Amino acid sequence: MKAPAIGWQLLLAFVLSIELLAGLIDWLQNVHIITANGMYKSIQAEAWIADFSQARLDPSNYLYFPLYGLLCRLLDWLGILRGVPWKQFAYLNAFFASVGVVIVYAFVHRVTDSVLASVLAVMFHLGSGCVLLLSVINEDIMPGYVAVLGAMALAGLWFDRPSHLRVAVVGALFTLGWLIEWRLMFPTLPALVLALAIAPDPEPRAWLRRLATIGTLIVSILAVSGIVQLVWDGHNGAVGLHDMLWTGKGLASGWAGLSTDKLWLMLSGVGNYLLLTGPLVTVVAAKQLAWLLSFSILIQLAIFVASVIALWPWREEPRLRTIAVVFLGTLGAGQVLNLYSQPQDPQMQLNVMPWLTVAWALLVASLLPRVRLAVVLALAFLSVVPLVWNVVELARSRGGDAKSVAALASLERRFPPETTVYVYWGFEPITMWHYALWSRTWDWDGAAEVEPAPSSNPRFKWIAIDAGAIRHPQWTAEEHAQSIRRDIDLAFERGYRVVIADVWSWSVEELADQLGALAAAGRAPVIHDLLHSAYEVGPPVYEPAAGTYYELRRR
């Protein structure tokens, strides 16, 4: 039977994937699995939803908030989750993820001319841990990632015979992607330049033509950036072209830096890309699940080795070399950058790991004509295993949003916000619900102006243990610890009861593991000693979905 035209195949791939993802979102009822960042981004987008003319541009997400603000207004107009952008974001991510599925299908079909290989590739791609996770929660990476993925796919298909038009199209699409999420520029740009630098050319002075195409890529990037800059010129928060190209996001914070703990976090990030191992992405979790994360990475390594062996006879084929340079070049540059920043974060792995789907697709396509039905069925089974595994893993967090809202209501009864200051580690999911539903207030970090108790201005009053490591990487351990103590003592002086979360019960080693993600593990002994020498606690109070709380007292 003749396969349907490619257009119908792509439409079917989109429809099936968005139905799957939307159904999964509705079933899970938890759009904050692993990270609460999407809630903060949805709050930031509220201004764009309410009034485009007054909303402020974000240099590192220059097009993200206008795009999602406009789309949320469309969903409001359609009556879909009206006024709940933090849920709308998840469905919008499912839409863009489905566009990503179409890109993968079209790319694999063009390279292999095999419907079956294309189907198995998109099943493998959509079922991969980080891809599936970020397709059903409200994190902010998906639209930018899909645009850059499209640019990578076109580069893989076109850069073996680059024309200036083709290069300009890739550059334009790539630029739109990183203007949605700035950091997406860096892993892929070197790979695109390298692919153009090695493009085959029979002309005697081929190096001049290669330099010209690289120049076209750079000019197209600058031109599209310049057009966007001119369109938004004069808008609230608009910046110049230089500041669009270099925002420096995250560099002057605790996220930046090298440490041995980052190796554990890299294990977590790369392992979870294929097979999710739990809701936590910390050094502690990576050590506890090292065997499972290593197993996931061994599977990825096996796919890589098997694809190299299967494709070795075609190693001189220009398109295959171009595809390898684009996708493996992005992998190499991306993991170097990730090691310096946040290798455990699923969104940091998402755009550097598409090579895995490409390797699997090419391996499957090379095997299909030469194997029996049993092997074909085995390949189909293996293609769907990540999807099944990861859905089961995601199901462990089912209903999390409602449970967290209920936990917050219970905390409000136990510890009235008018008279309570909370001490948190800083990354607990419940802090996001405090922020979203009580008051939009950040932790004190030594700069709070506190009214005497009782006071509802603001309702959410809190101190974050990790604040010094994030915002003040230049501090010593003693400076960090004393800042925490000053904030806690200020709360007591103003007449508040102080309640501390699970971080109180952590050992020095556990605190060091957590601070390791911020390149600040060495601060743990001093901070731990200060807390436990200056203060004592009452009996623990356990709140499901939020954790254990202790009332803090001065010794």
Image: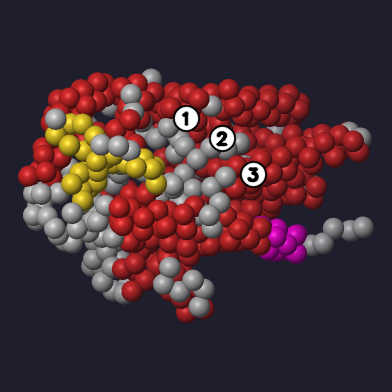
- Per the image, label 1 sits on a secondary structure element best described as helix
> Label 1: which residue?
285
Image location (x, y in percent) of residue 488: 15, 40
- Is residue 180 shown to the viewer in this render? no
Q: Amino acid at mark 3?
A: Val
Tell me if label 1 and label 3 are in contact, CB under 8 Å: no
Image location (x, y in percent) of residue 152: 56, 45
Is 490 located above or below residue 1 in the figure?
above
Q: Quadrant of residue 314?
A: top right
Residue 138 lies in magenta, yes or no? Answer: no
Query: What is the basis of the colouring in this image?
Result: secondary structure
- Is residue 349 shown to the viewer in this render? yes
Is 495 located above or below residue 57 in the figure?
above
Residue 12 lies in magenta, yes or no? Answer: yes
Tell me if label 2 and label 1 are in contact, CB under 8 Å: yes
Left or right of 163? Residue 383 is right
Which numbered disc, 2 or 1, marks the residue that appears first in the sequence? 2
Q: Quadrant of residue 15?
A: bottom right
Which numbered disc, 1 or 3, marks the residue that appears first in the sequence? 1
What's the magenta bit mostly, secondary-structure-wise?
helix
Alpha carbons under labels 2 and 1: distance apart:
9 Å
- Per the image, label 3 sits on a secondary structure element best described as helix
